[in-house]
Amino acid sequence: MILRGVLFDLDGTLGDHDASVRDALTAWLPSLGLAYSAEVHEVWDALAEKHLAAWRTREITFAEQRRRRLRDFLGIHDEESELDAIFAGFVSAYAVSYRAFDDAFDGIAAARDAGLTVAVLTNGSSEQQNGKLARMGMTGIGPVWTPDDLGVAKPEPATFALACARWGIPAGQVLSVGDRHDLDVLPARVAGLRAVHLDRSRETEGHRIGSLRDLAAYLSGPGPSPSGGK
């Protein structure tokens, strides 16, 4: 496998988004007279996915997806400024809670030890995602691309193609590593990249790793074809 670069996803791959959301909801919900539970967390995640999907297709702004999420979650119809102020409490708690997975730096080191350059391709606002990287001590990891930079979001294959073009590395010489099979793996292959699924919970296909600590062994092996080579 001839590679020159590894394109990491951020949330769920380098950063432990789920644990950070759990801790943020636990800290923030009491200010609204609510308590954290697994069921409440499930509802929050479902609403987040629903409205982020509309943002990914550029139907609504990033701020509007937050407002719609909050309207559905709380069943309120406050003015935009009031909704923004309420959501700011969650954003603040989430920022404080955000952390790296304990295998994140191992994965980055594995790529660099293999002589590969590293970059990040992530959905989310540029300000927020770069802030997460800074909090995790990953400032300077390499180029960071968000929909704010590219004008498109994953799972559009064009997102990967544009990132590679700006990176100056042919798509076929880039490996995409991410936890979402639908966002980080399948569309990357459509764009011509190689891709491996970071699947910490269950096996979905042959080209998978259970931890970023497995990336070194994966890179030293035969590797996948651009189409996945199942």
Image (cartoon, grey):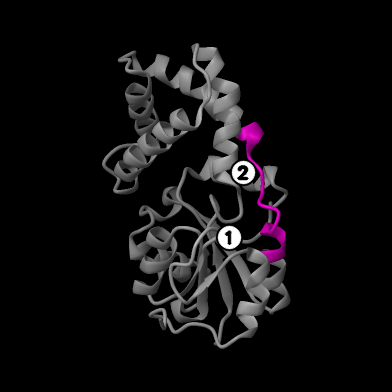
Q: Which amino acid type corresponds to the residue marked 1 in the rendered image? A: Pro
Say which element carries label 2.
Answer: helix
Relative side of 15 to 181, left or right: right
In the displayed structure, does residue 4 sit left or right of residue 176? Answer: right
Answer with mark 2 or mark 1, whichever residue precedes in sequence: 2
Who's the residue at 44% across and 62% down the image?
Answer: 184
Query: Residue 4 sits in which quadrant?
Result: bottom right
Relative height, residue 33 to residue 218 (above, below):
above
Is 96 inside the magenta-drawn segment?
yes
The answer to whether residue 121 is visible is: yes
Q: Residues within 10 Å of mark 2 (few under 14, many from 20)?
A: many
In the rendered image, is residue 168 in sight? no
> Residue 36, image x and y in percent?
53, 24
Residue numbers of the magenta segment? 95-107
The image quarter containing residue 2 is: bottom right
> Could you say where residue 21 lies in the image, as x and y percent from the top left?
54, 36
Do the residues bearing badges 2 and 1 touch, measured as CB atoms within 8 Å?
no
Q: Is residue 49 left or right of residue 4?
A: left
Give the x, y percent position of residue 6. Answer: 57, 70
Task: Residue 103: give x, y in percent of width and height.
Answer: 69, 59
Of the numbered discs in the image, which one, if any, rests on residue 143?
1
Residue at 35% from the left image edge and 58% from the top image edge = 155
Nearer to the camera, 22 or 187: 22
The residue wearing badge 2 is 132
Task: Name which residue lies at 39% across and 37% down.
Answer: 48
C-alpha gap between disc 2 and disc 1 = 14 Å
